[in-house]
Image (spheres, rainbow, N blue to C red):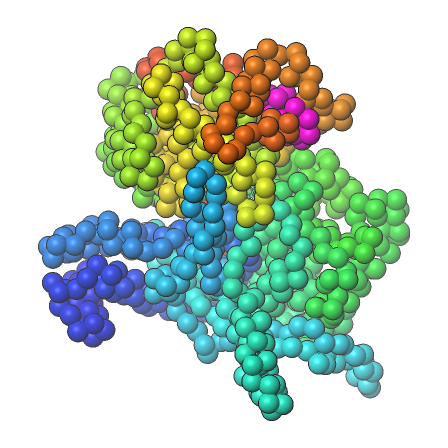
Amino acid sequence: MDNFATDIKKYLEKIFGNTIDEASERQIYQALMVITRDRLAEKRFESNKKLKESQQKRVYYMSMEFLVGKTLRNNLYNLGYEDEIKHFLAKHGFSLERIYNIEPDPGLGNGGLGRLASCYMDALTSNDYPIMGFSILYEFGIFKQVISDGWQQEYPDNWLDLGRYGLLYRNDEEIEVKFYGNTKEEWSSEGLHIRYEDYTAIKAEPYDLFISGYDSDTVNVLRLWKSKATGGFNMKLFEKGEYSKSLESEAIAESISKLLYPADDNDNGKALRIKQQYFFTSASLQQIVKNHYDTYMTLDNFAEKVVIHINDTHPSMCIPELMRILMDEYEYSWDKAWSITTKTFAYTNHTIMAEALEKWSVDLFQPILPRIYTIIREINNRFCKWCNDIGAAGELDEMSIIHNNVIRMANLCIVSSYSVNGVSMLHTEILKKDTFKSFNRIYPGKFINVTNGIAHRRWLGQANPELTRYLNKLLGVDFIKDLSSIDKLLEYQDDKAVLEDLENIKNIKKLQLAEYIKSSTAIKVDTNSIFDVQIKRLHEYKRQLLNALHIIYLYRMIKFNGLKPYPRTFIFSAKASSGYVMAKNIIKLICSISEIIEADPIVREYIKVVFLEDYRVSLAEKIIPAANVSEQISQAGKEASGTGNMKLMLNGAVTLGTMDGANVEIHNAVGQDNIFIFGLSSEEVEELFKNDYRAIDYYNNNQDIKETIDFMRTLDNGHTNFNYIADYLVSTDPYMCLADFESYKNTQKIVEDTYQDKGKWNKMSLVNIAKSGIFSADRATKEYVEKIWKIEKIK
Ligand code: Z16
């Protein structure tokens, strides 16, 4: 540690010519980032040495998204330096907290899927498993959201400006990726040879982000690829004297890693997206194969030593890319290459929503990736032939990889992987019984479930140090090391003093959040009110609209019917994909309700609505510890798992939810007395949808719904009105908000009544914390290790 202080001083002297007392916060920040990175690089060297010696099997985790969140606190926390650096800096008049705030959130993901990938990297590293992540170094991560007059506006997130100090540029390992062009078949005495001509090559530059583990010697790497024009590529154009064109082509090459597509759970079918996918999968696969070959001088044992995990279908081009490398570069036959490939890949599915299952039109795909396309076509031909042989030809409409001139990437993954998993019990059941039922029939045992988990060290240890310290002292167990031991808290479920302590800690976190709300929205909230939280991407299926509709109902009842509910603060935070009109309108609706209530001296005594802009990991860390109620109200069958639900539970919020995703597991864990479940089940949703759901009937037959929607049409703050949304609710809403409204409203009333019984509420909250052990990413990744990957810890 002495060393760390010395290193800071040295860095300041060397880079800025400053003493620590002359340095700015910005300079201290840079020093801490760089020194931490270099410490991790040294540790990485040691753990890598062990890994090379043991020659053990490794996992490569391929994901278009890693929602890393701020790294500095996490790394110092994991390395155990936090307290000492805090004191050292304080001696010189600096606040470590303020330094942490300088770091931008690396927002290299949209939401759940990206954050899951980061939680898993953290957990696997803490548990000493050899994993390497691969993704793209987006110059612009998920956009910055600014709310202006209630509307979402998107601004570029220039995170590398200050974020780059955590990265290590490895230009010794850059790789070329090829697009376009033609393939030629050449026969010689040695057999068939594929010549790839007239392609366009682009450089992939690796940037490494080190992943630290808690109380562990292991450091793993997340490798992020940045696209660059190749020198030769430009020179060709230079020779023709086309200087400006050469710069254009450079810009095109560099556009590949320019930005993250902000559509969560939606397939956007763009050529640039294909290029992004192939760019990062090809670079990664070349790297992986090279690592393997350099170690073993053969690829025959590839599948014994390598697992490549595909996070959703976004990295699915890994599959034909491995086939291509094995056949075109290492001269394997189709059958041998296929045998290796199908033992190498494991695939996680994260959605059943049709619009999110990736499909590429052949016409778009083939010119960009001609060789990859012929390989996919051949995989499909052989698969179809095999289905014929086993009598499954009748199900090829569902199963064939290429269908009506589109490539169905999920089908490619299922056919080519040895394991396919869903992310919650219900989700996996739906995959097996519905979405992929024919596949499940022809590949018995291939589909398995691994319910998602979260990095509790970040979501409890770091986000809620007050609760962590308290539980540490009370329980006398290291639940940060092993979250399952937190169930010892159950012994205190009837202990009045403990229940009060927990309530006091919750109030401290509510006060901190209230401060933040005041500073970012100017709204003063009452910390005695129920903090009711819905934070997640904005999506129709997640039904923020149902929540908003209920708030409008309350507003009307308070204003015109003398209702005096227990005070409640409804807190929302959500980004909408930039092209998603309905989602943006829902944000506008929520912001308008907030404004209208603020302007109403009577209603605002009871309910308030707060929309916090720019939802991101670091904001979630502020909101979650302060929540009393966790809104998980998606239409049953639609949310694959959810992970915010777990983070909120871990921090003592009580779930108000449908029987959807991992809410089902939460329900099983806490029992029905410690959760508020409402609404239709996924089977009932299916039934009702098939039998022609008629929203208008709910409007006509339910007085509250009728009055609420009529009232909604009168809400008009200035130039906007909400007829558009009201019309949708009573007509085409596929997520059937009105069908669940009555049940939601009644359950909300139960929530309110229960909250007023402080003893009862606190006990519910305690049980939620105590039962959250199974939602640790330690448990989830252990299941991946044992059921799918079959890897060992680094020794
Ligand atoms: C995503 O975040 C998810 C699914 C998907 O197909 C694409 C993206 Cl970007 C989410 C699911 O919606 C959510 O239910 C789940 O908890 C999360 O992935 C992690 O599995």
Q: Quadrant of the N terminus?
A: bottom left
- The span picked out in magenta is 729-744
Question: Where is 137 relative to 314, above or below?
Answer: below
Residue at the location (62% across, 60% down)? Answer: 273
Q: Quadrant of residue 584?
A: top right
Residue 763 at what x, y percent from top left?
Answer: 36, 19
Question: Where is 307 relative to 701, above or below?
Answer: below
Q: State yes or no: residue 735 in magenta.
A: yes
Question: Where is 489 relative to 410, above or below?
Answer: above
Q: Quadrant of the C terminus?
A: bottom left
Residue 769 at what x, y percent from top left?
Answer: 38, 29
Q: Is residue 354 visible?
A: yes
Q: Is residue 788 left or right of residue 434?
A: left
Residue at the location (56% across, 23% down)? Answer: 713
Residue at the location (50% across, 27% down)? Answer: 716
Q: State yes or no: residue 17 in magenta.
A: no
Q: Is residue 672 left or right of residue 318?
A: left
Ligand 1 falls in quadrant: top right
Residue 603 at what x, y percent from top left?
Answer: 38, 18
Q: Nearer the viewer, residue 44 or 737?
A: 737
Residue 283 at what x, y percent from top left?
Answer: 57, 69
Q: Residue furthest top?
A: 562
Count of numbered marks: 0
Q: Nearer the viewer, residue 457 or 281?
A: 281
Q: Nearer the viewer, residue 491 or 538?
A: 538
